Image (cartoon, grey):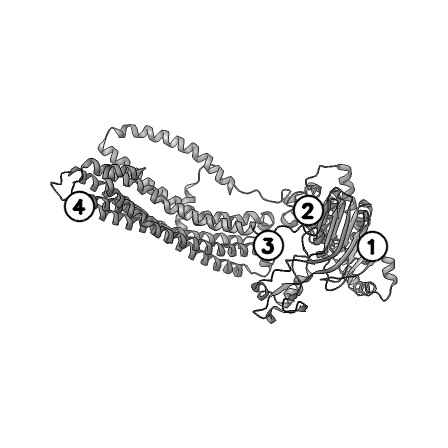
Amino acid sequence: GYMTILGTLLGWTCLIGLFVIMTSIPIMGKMTGKMFGMNRLMVKYTDERVKTVNEALQGILCVKMYTWEDSFAKQVDKSRQEELVSLRKIAYYRAFFRAYMSALPIFAAAATFLVYVYATDEGISASILFSSIVAFEMLRFPLMFLPMVIAQYAQCKVSLKRVAVFLGYGEVNEAGYTRNPDKKGEVKIENATVYWSDPNTPIPRSALKNISPMDMSTKSSSSSKSTRSLFRSKSNNTLAETQSSEVDDNELVYPTAILKDVNIHISNGELCAVVGPVGSGKSTLCSSILNEAVLTEGSHITLNGNTAYVAQTAWILNKTVRDNILFGLPYDEEKYNKVIDACSLRHDLSILDDGDMTEIGERGINLSGGQKQRISVARAAYSNADVFIFDDPLSALDPEVASKVFDECILGLLEGKTRLLVTNQLQCLPKCDTVIALGKHGKVLEQGTYADLINDKNGEVSRLLKDLAPSRRSLSAVSDEKEDEKDDDIAPKKKVVEEEAKKLMTKEEREEGSVKLRVYLKYIQAGGGYFLFSLVFSWYILSAGVNLASSIWVSVWTADAAYKKRSETFYMVGYAISAILMGIMSFFRAYGLASFGVKSSSSLHGRVLRSVMRAPMRFFDTTPTGRILSRFSKDMHSIDHEIADFVDIFLFLILQLAIVMGSIIVVTPWFAVVLPFLGFFYFRSMNYFRQVSRETKRLES
């Protein structure tokens, strides 16, 4: 639209201005690519920083116990410094971009006028000059905000690529897996060979280098989704115990099977026990039934009926005990009481001041391990599912309580249901319908009734039970002793905690009303203090002064339209010099504010990090981890990327508004009479919007 106006006023010479603007496109493309690369690199360091903070928060008890606060803080600061390097480079690119775009329209106007004068041999009349300059000025504002748009585009592009990578991950593999929730509870596993990851995809070399043989062995024995230390080499296609340090750089290493050639059938209403040494694949068996593992071609798993799963590590919601058990289902008092009694929770609820309405802290910090596990079992029992998968929940209980939960809940309350129980509790096996013994390397050694298996004295199951029996008895004795000690002192401990915290988790603080002045002053102090901010503000004043001088120069030029005092060249050179000065001032203005913002961001992050690390354990027990992480992710992102831009726009517009209003009052003094009324209505409307916008931002964070 503006180019059409310029074409009408200046004819074909307006194409010169268009050409000058078009030459900026390659520069814009180059700068955009640089900013995109910097954003992508910065996001990498941001992820590392937030990951380290999350690890520290998840293990804050160990961090406090071993006084690792400073070590974690140094690790976080290291990632933060790398992040700030990228942030500082992005800010400088944007400063150059903004300066270039601020001066570009004036350069385009000067070049157009120069060609117009010397190519057409016509003078520039006041009407053409003023109208053309206004049109070029109108082009300046979109070009000034273009760097901000491009910076946002670069961030958006990085975010979209990350989301695209996530969405591009493989879908849940349905091949070989059949789920029939409407049928009676039953589990069928036929010729199943199970992997934790795609057996046709090589393991990343970085993963091998970061995994020691000991770590591999440890990972293979845990219930988490990790592979054993066995890998299948593509060169010979045989299983070998391969250490990461011995793998040839040119050799591809593939994951090996956790379970091999498994055939299991658990009929409706049957109780099946799975036993085996550590690392034999018991938890993997449970996960494969839930379709959380990878099956090879020819494997098939059928799961009929609705399923309830109790993990080896109890999963607890940050809600009341009742909410954890109901898990969204309607409250049935009779059924609920049966579940409470069957899971031996009645005594525990009597200890708590609020009974089953007691709020459980994050990760169940105000419950013992046995209490958390029994609540998990109660949640499954209340669900009234058709198939129950118990991944060794009895190991967290002492033998007496474990026997009671097994008899009253798994055998009694859930009688007639299909149950798979992973356990090494030997006293439970005679009461199970079938027993499956897994050996090392994930193979089923034997399966059948307990009587049949135990009668075979030379069988693998008898040998396995003999190996397990001494260790289980010794562990049971220790567990029993510890549980007795725990029961003796649990009541006074709970009393102390619950008297002070019926509502355990603290409510998040939320400011009301307008943002206090001290908040803005803290940001200024974090950036280097009032003196440094005054220097930055002085560049804004100089930039506004150059802008005002440019307008005055144009008014002097139009007043001498006949060029009696000065030549056209004089005025055009002066106009070009004002463009250069405006670009220089814009650069130093943006550069100064960017440096100030990065310094402020670095200082605020350091204060937040050390405040959190030095907080007492009670703070972490009563504050959700997500709330703390939000300060290091979402809030720090706002400080890094948004506040400096908002400050820049605010200072620029305030000075521009002061100059424009002052100019109007000088030219038209009567405007000063109307200005207070206009200001009153404007501020009333603005405050109405600010209230809504401010509260929305507070809810968002």
Q: Calculate the distance from the C-alpha at mark 1 to the C-alpha at mark 4.
A: 102 Å
Q: Which of marks 2 and 3 is nearer the N terminus?
A: 3
SS for callout 3: helix
SS for callout 1: strand
Q: According to the image, label 3 marks what residue?
A: 58
Q: According to the image, label 4 marks what residue?
A: 118
* Nearest to the observer: residue 180 or residue 397: 180
Q: Which of marks 1 and 3 is in front?
A: 1
Q: Earlier in the sequence, mark 1 or mark 2?
A: 1
Seen at 75% across and 48% down, the residue is 388
* Nearest to the observer: residue 554 or residue 531: 554
**Could you tell me which quadrant the N terminus lies in?**
top left
**Pointer 3 local density, CA inside 10 Å: few below 14, some 14–19, many at least 20:** some
**Pointer 4 local density, CA inside 10 Å: few below 14, some 14–19, many at least 20:** few
Q: Position of residue 103 (x, y in %)?
A: 28, 47
Asked whether the beta carbons under mark 2 and mark 4 sit within 8 Å of each other, the answer is: no
Give, as a three-letter code, the residue at label 2. Answer: Lys
Q: Calculate the distance from the C-alpha at mark 4 to the C-alpha at mark 3.
A: 73 Å
Give, as a three-letter code, the residue at label 1. Answer: Thr
Seen at 33% across and 41% down, the residue is 141
Q: Nearer the viewer, mark 4 or mark 3?
A: 4
The vertical placement of 210 against 362, above or below, is below
Q: Where is residue 339 in the image (x, y as percent from the top left)?
A: 77, 43
Q: Calculate the distance from the C-alpha at mark 1 to the C-alpha at mark 3.
A: 39 Å
Q: In this view, does 63 lie to the left or right of 341?
A: left
Q: Position of residue 684 (x, y in %)?
A: 39, 30
